[in-house]
Amino acid sequence: MQSTTGKSSHAKRAHGGADIARNRTQPRRNDKTRSSTSARAGSEERQRFFALSLDLLCVAGTDGRFKDLNPRWEQVLGYSLDELMSRPFLDFVHPDDRAPTIAAVETLWKGEDVVCFTNRYRHKDGHYILLEWNSSAMPERQVLYALARDVTEREAISAARRAAEERLQHLLLSSRVVVYAANASNDFVPTFISNNVAGQFGYGIRELSTLGFWVERIHPEDRERFVTGRAALLEDGTHSCEYRLRHKDGNYRWIHDDSKVVRDAEGNAVEVVGSWQDMTERHESEQMIRRQAAALLELSTPLIPVSDDILVMPLIGVVDSRRAGQVLEMLLKGIVQRSARVAILDITGVGIVDTKVADTFMRIARAVQLVGTSFILSGIRPDVAQTLASLGADLKGLTTHSTLQAAIRQAMMRRGSGVADR
């Protein structure tokens, strides 16, 4: 019994030891299985990411050839993956970009990353695609990894924007109009001024961006008008005026200032935009025109003093309502200045005297007589006489002569007889 029992106990211990051994080795087998399963899953995820990425992913070796590429390369460059991996990748690079590409690869083999490097790759149809690269290498394993992105469209848009900005700057620099933007507040401090401002007004952008700098240089006689109009800008929405601004050289220039309030969708003032334009030449031209007009007026309505108290105004050309007013103004002014006793208006050189012109002469005669001066109308041709008669106006008190000589003789006689004494 004891012997049997002992054998039985020994067998049980042996059997129990085997169970323990099996239990100890089983987790190891499970760990290996789980590890293998996890590795396969991770590899599948990487392959899925590699295949579905919208970026161009690649692995390359020290021989200058691609070792692995994702399908995106076929979509972007048009070649099959086999075609891309069958030749050195430099064969696809634009000739002008090969030297920089070689330099970038050498940098990678030194263990340094290359970021935002760009070069052009030839598409299968012959045109070039601009790629932007982010790359890293493992020199010890003689392999480099890179991610590229097609930035052709982005760079085309950027180039077009730069060209537009350069074109705008060129136009502004050659333009006489300065554009600006300012705070939508009562201080109106400029936040932007085009670069041509110095050429127009002599001041730099930094100077003009100082609070109150512009207003302080407006002519004292124009400043209050400008400030009043600008104060109402935020409410009115627009403001336009002309004023004199002191140029940096010390001279005043006439400025045309247009400004407008920019508002958001809720109607809030966002900023003020506007333009300054030097109008000095226009103002000087207008002044010159006014001076020339005054000179022409004097030439077209000359006053000839025959003596100290006799004035003659010979008219030549067309007499319209405007010129009639000028004739009357000049004649009355001359009479007052010279204390003339007799005024002679000679119309020998007037081509056409119709009813309207004849009526004008009658009004001039009455106005001259009202200031106490005798009036004589000379140069009366037969046709003029008929027109004056057809008016049916009261011609009493109006002295007329067919020639200027006859009118001057009568004026001299009147002066001698004292008829014209006031």
Image (cartoon, rainbow, N blue to C red):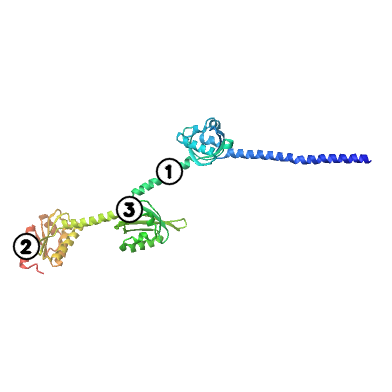
Q: Nearer the viewer, residue 54 or 400?
A: 54
Provide residue 329's location: percent of width, then percent of height.
18, 62
Q: Is residue 123 visible from the viewing direction of this image? A: no
Ranked by sequence position, the earlier of labels 3 and 1 is: 1
Amino acid type assigned to the residue bearing label 1 in the image: Ala
Q: Are marks 1 and 2 in contact (CB under 8 Å)?
A: no
For mark 3, does the 10 Å Cα neighbourhood hold few (<14), some (14 to 19), or many (20 or more) residues? Answer: some
Image quadrant assignment for residue 334: bottom left
Give the labeled residue for mark 2: 410
Q: Nearer the viewer, residue 395 or 29?
A: 29
What separation in Å lies between label 2 and label 3 (alpha carbons)?
64 Å
Image quadrant assignment for residue 142: top right
Q: Is residue 167 visible from the viewing direction of this image? A: yes
Q: Are marks 3 and 1 in contact (CB under 8 Å)?
A: no
Give the labeled residue for mark 1: 160
Image-based side of 182 in relation to 398, left or right: right
